[in-house]
Image (cartoon, rainbow, N blue to C red):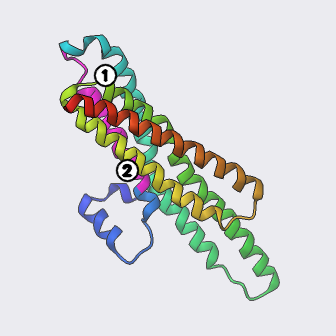
């Protein structure tokens, strides 16, 4: 599993001529790192006398951020597995008409599955960014920059995952799925952009 490698091993594999892990896995990893930073700011706020009024809220955010981090981390590997599934489908025999039909169906199914993974990343980021906003606004001011980086990492995760979703949608023939997913992507990207602006506004206020 990719997530069990050391940082150096992961980066070496990422830099290799293998197409996976690629941008999809990195988008999921960026999301996991964003939620990890959110959790860190919570922990640096909890127990501080100056922030006793928000301790209960920070504890709640911490629990949710850790759950989201776990889900996003799992998607790092799932994205690579989904890509490999698409490649396997393209590798199916296509000598006879029957084989061609089976291969085409397998490609569509694998591509559909490969679309759902980055879409899931986007949906998790959609839940994660409001947490980063809240810790930017109410968390330990000494860690405000960390909250800002958390929001930026989550934005990168969302934008990167969206690129992968859109790429896969271009190969799918299910018009209803394509239309509905395209609308979801647009909505989530819009909320992500707004959330990052809100988080950075709070951070800039704290660091100036």
The answer to which quarter of the image holds residue 136 is top left
Prevailing secondary structure class for the magenta stretch in the rendered image: helix
- Circle 1 sits in a helix, a strand or a loop, which is it? helix
Residue behind mark 1: 138
The answer to which quarter of the image holds residue 13 is bottom left
As for residue 21 lying within the magenta part, the answer is no
Q: Residue at x 71, y 53 (%)?
A: 179
Where in the figure is residue 51, as x and y percent of width and height?
24, 15
Q: Dot 1, how many residues are within 10 Å of its Cα: few (below 14), some (14-19), or many (20+)?
A: many
The segment highlighted magenta reads 27-48
- Name the disc covering residue 30, or none: 2
In the picture as drawn, the residue positioned furthest to the bottom comes out as: 95
In this rendering, would 5 be left or right of 207?
Answer: right
Residue 96 sits above or below residue 189 on the image: below
Nearer to us in this view, 183 or 168: 183
Residue 118 sits above or below residue 64 on the image: below
In this rendering, would 118 be left or right of 104?
Answer: left
In the picture as drawn, the residue positioned furthest to the right comes out as: 97
In this rendering, would 45 be left or right of 88?
Answer: left
The alpha-carbon separation of the residues under discs 2 and 1 comes to 23 Å
Residue 197 sits above or below residue 205 on the image: below
N-terminal of the two: label 2 or label 1? 2
Residue 149 sits above or below residue 79 on the image: above
Where in the figure is residue 160, as x and y percent of width and height?
46, 56
Q: Residue at x 53, y 60 (%)?
A: 164
């Amino acid at each position: 599993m990719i997530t069990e490698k050391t940082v150096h091993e992961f980066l070496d594999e990422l830099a290799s001529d293998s197409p996976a892990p690629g941008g999809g896995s990195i988008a999921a990893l960026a999301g996991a790192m964003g939620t990890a930073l959110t959790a860190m700011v919570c922990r640096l706020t909890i127990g501080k006398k100056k922030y006793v009024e928000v301790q209960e809220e920070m504890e709640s955010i911490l629990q949710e951020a850790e759950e989201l981090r776990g889900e996003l981390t799992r998607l790092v590997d799932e994205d690579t597995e989904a890509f490999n599934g698409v490649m396997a489908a393209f590798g199916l025999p296509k000598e006879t008409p029957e084989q061609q039909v089976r291969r085409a169906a397998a490609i569509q199914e694998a591509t559909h599955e490969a679309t759902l993974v980055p879409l899931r990343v986007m949906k998790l980021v959609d839940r994660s960014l409001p947490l980063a906003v809240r810790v930017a606004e109410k968390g330990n001011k000494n860690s405000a920059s960390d909250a800002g980086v958390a929001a930026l990492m989550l934005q990168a995760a969302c934008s990167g995952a969206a690129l992968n979703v859109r790429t896969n949608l271009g190969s799918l023939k299910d018009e209803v799925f394509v239309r509905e997913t395209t609308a979801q992507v647009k909505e989530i990207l819009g909320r992500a952009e707004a959330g990052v602006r809100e988080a950075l506004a709070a951070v800039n206020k704290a660091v100036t």
